[in-house]
Structure formats: C-alpha cells, structure tokens
Amino acid sequence: MKKKVFTNGATVILSVVTLIFCISSCAQKTPDTDVEVTEAIPKNWSQWRGPNNGGISDETDVPIQWSQTENVRWRLPLPGEAAATPVVWGDKIFLTSADGSELVLMCVSTEGEELWKRTLAQGNRTSRGDEVNYAAPSPTTDGEHIWAFLGTGDLACYDFEGNPIWQTNLEERYGKFRLGFLMSMTPLLDKDKLYLQLIHSNAWLVLALDKMTGEEIWKHDRKSDATRECEHAYTSPILYRDAEREFLVVHGADYVTAHNLEDGSEIWRCGGLNSRERYNPSFRLVASPVATEGLIVVPSAKNGPVLGLAPSGTGDITETKWQIWKLQRGTPDVPSPLIHDGLVYLCRENGDLICLDAETGEQLYRQRTHRHRHRSSPIYANGYIYLTARDGVVSVVKAGREFEIVATNSINEAVAASPVIVDGTLYLRSYDALYAIGQ
C-alpha cells in the first residue's frame, strides 16, 4: 500500500465520516426504555455529479480557500492519469486510474490510505495529448457495490472489499466503439438497473443492465440523421423524476431524447441543436444535460445553443411549447450545466461563467473567471459555485444573480475530474494525486 502524504508537517489521523441524525421517521424506541435511538446515516457522493446527478451538495461546512499545502488534510499520490471523478460512500473513496499500461479501480479510505486496487483491463490509450484516456468514465456506487466502466468497453462490479462480482465488455457485446476520441460515458445507477448510452459511428444504443449480473434488461436502437463526427457523443445519461413522471434523458447525435425506464422506448425527442441550414459536421456533444423539477437544461457544443425544456412533452418537441426557452449561443462545450435556486450556471471552456434565469432563460450576466481551459463540471455548496480549470485553479464564485469571485485556489497540477464535497471535505483529483481539502 502507498503511504499517505500529509502536507501540514505532522501525521494526523482524520475521520471525515461525520454521522448525522436520521429524520424523525427513522427514530425507534428501545423495548425496555423510553429513550429514542436514531439511526446514523453518513453523507455520500455516489456518482459523478453527486446523489441527485446535478452537482449539488447540501454541505454547509465547506472550504473555500486552499493551496497545495494550506487547508490540505492529506494528499495521496496516484499511479497514473485519469479524468474520472471519485465517488465517496461512508469512509471509502473509489476511483479509476491508469497505472502504467493497466487500468485499475482503487479504493481509498477517507483517511488517505490506499485500501485495495484491482486491475480491470490492460492497454491504456490517450487522446488529445493528455486530455483523456481510457479511465475517463467515473465509477458509481450504491453503498454495497461499486461499478466501473472504461473506454475499453470493460464494465465491472465489485463489492466494497474488492471482491469481483461480474465483468463484461460492451465492445464485444455491442460492437467496436468508433469515435473521434475515446468513449467517456459514465453509467447511471438507479434502483436495480445500470443505464448506459453507446453513441458512436457503429451504433446508437441505449441500454439497461441488471446491476447484479450485468445481463441486458432492454436495448433501444436510437434513431438519428446525424452524420460524420456528429454521430459521436461523449455525454452521460441522466434521470428525470418528479411526482408525475420519470424517464431517462440521453444526449447525442444531434438530439436529446427521453426514454421509458421499463423498456427504453422513446417518449420525446428534441433537435435544433445543430442547425440544418448551416450544418456543422464536427458538432460532437460532450456536456451532459441537467434536470430539476419542471426543467431540463440541454447544452450543445462549439458555442451553440442551450435549451430549457419542459419534461411533459411527447413526440418531436423541437421548437414547440415544450421548449420553454433557448439561449442562441454560449453553451458550455465540455462542463455540464448547473441549476440551483432558480438559476442556471454555464461554465464556458475559456472560464466565462454565464448565469441565466431558469424560468425565462434571460441572461443575467456573463463574467470572466480564470482564463484557462475548463473540462470539469461545476458544483454548488453552501452558497458558492466551484469552477475547476485544467491547470488546477478552482474559482469560487458566490451564487446568485450578481457575480462575485470570493476565492481563487491552485494546486498547480492538471485537473479534469470534477470536485466532490462530503462531510465538510472537498476531494479534488488531479492527474498526480487525490487531495482531501478541509477548513
């Protein structure tokens, strides 16, 4: 096992698993006393964009200032590069990584100790220089098992002790991936299913697999008239759910589509992302949609449009009443949007932050933050928006209708993963190390 490296000059034993009391419905009475016993529940970050897949944390004790040494609880060197965002459950952190020519799944304690490492595949590749490799997809967990997908097509399930449950290869099952770059889709876990989208020149597929066996539950052949590089998508599926409806949202090949969770059938689709009159043949989609009750925000690519869609449509809803608003230009190219408290935040590739009114799409501001490439998706916590640049600079912006940068922090290492906040600790994964940052 690798030794944890602390940067405050002294060895500190940390425990970042802060237990919170369950809501009153969880309270129990002991049989021989009237003393209430409440079940303690740890806070978790179970998938790429958090518990609700929207980049929102309800933490209140959150760091806003740090450096390579200041407010760093520990720094654990990693065996190789990756853009995958870690996930956290209880006292365990899971992440995928390159390790020489191998691709691995790692389990790290929240005290900064490597607990185990399992090899998932051999033969790593990189693309766009060091921008992406086969360890770009992020893992996901339900608190008992961890699922990891790689750009090689390998998909595996392990338990928390590192024991293999099952492994398969989606290229072998559904056809070789043909993309301009590398497959970067992160599977979505919900209840007993893993939902995946494989959108490339060989196939446009939406899948539901049994989470405990990897067996196919359903497969949907998604239709499109996209051509050339527009056939490719590097996006990930999301879930829309409210009191009246639930469905899968899939984004790629010039369209965003909604799918029935039981059989994958298409409920609605929306185009208008890539102009038919001025068709861009290299309009590949990378940024994923995000949803809140009553609204789905759909980005596009290459300074194209952003759509605000109502979830209640059916059929082809392109430029219909179900398109609530449309921002003609200014989409984030890689970072996914963020919705909080009636506002939509769009982080452009160059570090510009755009804030929209979620109800009307009105642009409230467009302001410059750190001028560098941004690949990570923004997250929200305790009144602040965190924007992470590739050079390791994180801009902390006050949430709201007025723009204000409250802190600019740097670890001076390349970062493509999104930040994670659990129990007052911000976890930041660079190409060199995993950082635990706290007040």
Image (spheres, grey):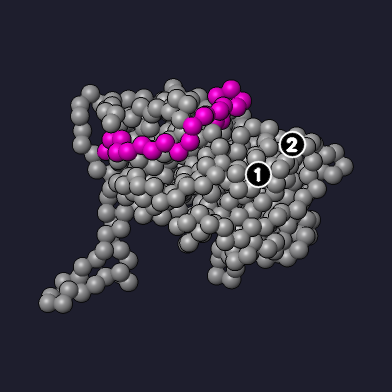
First to last magenta residue range: 111-133
Query: Could you tell me how far apart the alpha carbons at marks 1 and 2 are, in whole angstroms?
Result: 18 Å
Residue at which label 2 appears:
229
Toward the viewer: 321 or 74? 74
Q: Are marks 1 and 2 in contact (CB under 8 Å)?
A: no
Q: Residue at x 26, y 28 (%)?
A: 3
The residue at the far left in this view is 32
Toward the viewer: 438 or 384? 438
Residue at which label 1 appears:
175
Q: Examine the rendering and report whether any part of residue 9 can be seen.
A: yes
Q: Residue at x 52, y 39 (%)?
A: 150
Residue 404 image offset from top left, x and y in percent: 51, 37
CA neighbours of label 1 inside 10 A, class few (<14), some (14 to 19), many (20+)? few
The residue at the far right in this view is 277
Q: Is residue 128 magenta?
A: yes
Q: Is residue 94 magenta?
A: no
CA neighbours of label 2 inside 10 A, class few (<14), some (14 to 19), many (20+)? some
Dividing the picture into quarters, in which one does residue 35 lie?
bottom left
Q: Is 339 on the left or on the right of 360, as rendered?
A: left
Dividing the picture into quarters, in which one does residue 292 lie?
bottom right
Q: Earlier in the sequence, mark 1 or mark 2?
A: 1
Residue 203 image offset from top left, x and y in percent: 70, 46
Residue type marked 1? Gly
Residue 158 image offset from top left, x and y in percent: 39, 48
Residue 351 vertical placement versus 317 (above, below): above
Q: Residue at x 53, y 57 (%)?
A: 215
Q: Examine the rendering and report whether any part of residue 303 can be seen.
A: no
Q: Is 233 on the left or on the right of 71, as rendered?
A: right
Q: Residue at x 45, y 53 (%)?
A: 51
Which secondary structure, mark 2? helix
Toward the viewer: 67 or 156? 156
Residue type marked 2? Glu
